[in-house]
Image (tube, grey):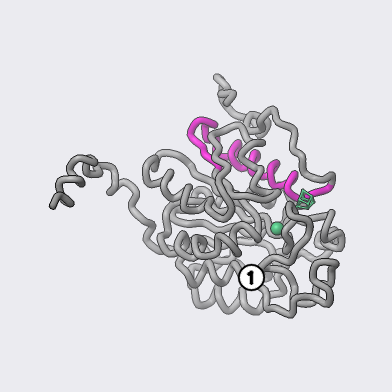
Amino acid sequence: MNVQAEIPYKASAYKSDLKPVWCPGCGDYHVLLSMSKALAELQRKPEEVAVVSGIGCSSRMPAYLNCYGFHGVHGRALPLATGLKVARPDLTVLVAGGDGDGFSIGGNHFLHACRRNIDLTYIVMDNRVYGMTKGQPSPTTEPDWDSALSPGGTGLSPFHPLVIALASGANFVARAFSGEVNRTAEILVEAIEHPGFSFVQILSPCVTFRPEQRNWKDMIHPAPVGETDDPGRAARRIMTDDNFNIGILYRGTRRPYDTKSNQNPKALDQLDTGFAI
Ligand code: SF4
Ligand code: MG
């Protein structure tokens, strides 16, 4: 990690020397920029930030950021980040990944991370497809998406991550669009600063396997009503929106998990004593 001696940190201070290997035009480039801008806005020192991911195109994110990073196995980013945050509550822990990684193989972890309400920020770059493995339908794919790997579409109802996050106990729920770099950075700043588990779905086009998603830039619009701290009201709004309204949709007051209460764990030999026969 290249740690800058001087502050203030600019967004460029959070970019690593590695050149991303994403396809030209992939929305994830913009998310990288938004994350860098958000960290610069917050003036978090790179050595006080950790980014944890699973597997997939967007899960390459830790390599491209100049802070601590952990590229884990498929679907396991959230339990890794949970352990890290409990052990090191002083760190700002961000979790980055995609819709396949987070909602399919990692779906169970998603529910319980929301329920535990640990102070993590989960950033999901949702392109409604498995990009890295060449275009299979993901949990958020539309039922009628016709492709070589899903002729005629799957016919399956898509997973609704925002309302599931809300119902499972997340304390902050937002939707952003990768093409709106500054707005996304603003939402990420709010998400990082809000205590507890923050979930940000970023619509991030996969221009290779879903080229029609280039049209998302014409479909997105600001949320027609302001944020709420009422989960019931937020749920009704999220369930009836068009999936393209952008903004903070719920900012709650649920009590976050107290990571500081775990700071004096029993030594291993004490635990062994407890289990001695
Ligand atoms: Fe981005 Fe899709 Fe290419 Fe993956 S396959 S890098 S998601 S455009
Ligand atoms: Mg995906």
Relative to 18, is 156 above or below? below
Mark 1: amino acid: Val
Label 1 crowd bin: few (<14), some (14–19), many (20+), radius 10 Å: few
Question: Quadrant where the N terminus lies?
Answer: top right
- For this view, does 174 lie left or right of residue 138? left
Relative to 144, is 45 above or below? above
The structure residue drawn at horizontal position 62% and vertical position 77%, both measured from the top left corner, is 239
For label 1, the SS is loop
For the image, the number of numbered tags is: 1
Q: Name the residue under label 1.
A: 225
Closer to us: 39 or 151: 151
Relative to 144, is 126 above or below? above
Magenta highlight: main SS: helix
The structure residue drawn at horizontal position 67% and vertical position 74%, both measured from the top left corner, is 158
Residue 23 position, x and y percent, is: 82, 45
Residue 8 position, x and y percent, is: 58, 27
* Quadrant of residue 246 within the rendered picture: bottom right
Residue 92 position, x and y percent, is: 48, 42
Q: Give the residues in magenta.
A: 25-51
Closer to us: 200 or 22: 22
Residue 44 among those drawn in magenta: yes
The structure residue drawn at horizontal position 47% and vertical position 57%, both measured from the top left corner, is 197
The structure residue drawn at horizontal position 68% and vertical position 70%, both measured from the top left corner, is 224
Closer to us: 148 or 95: 148
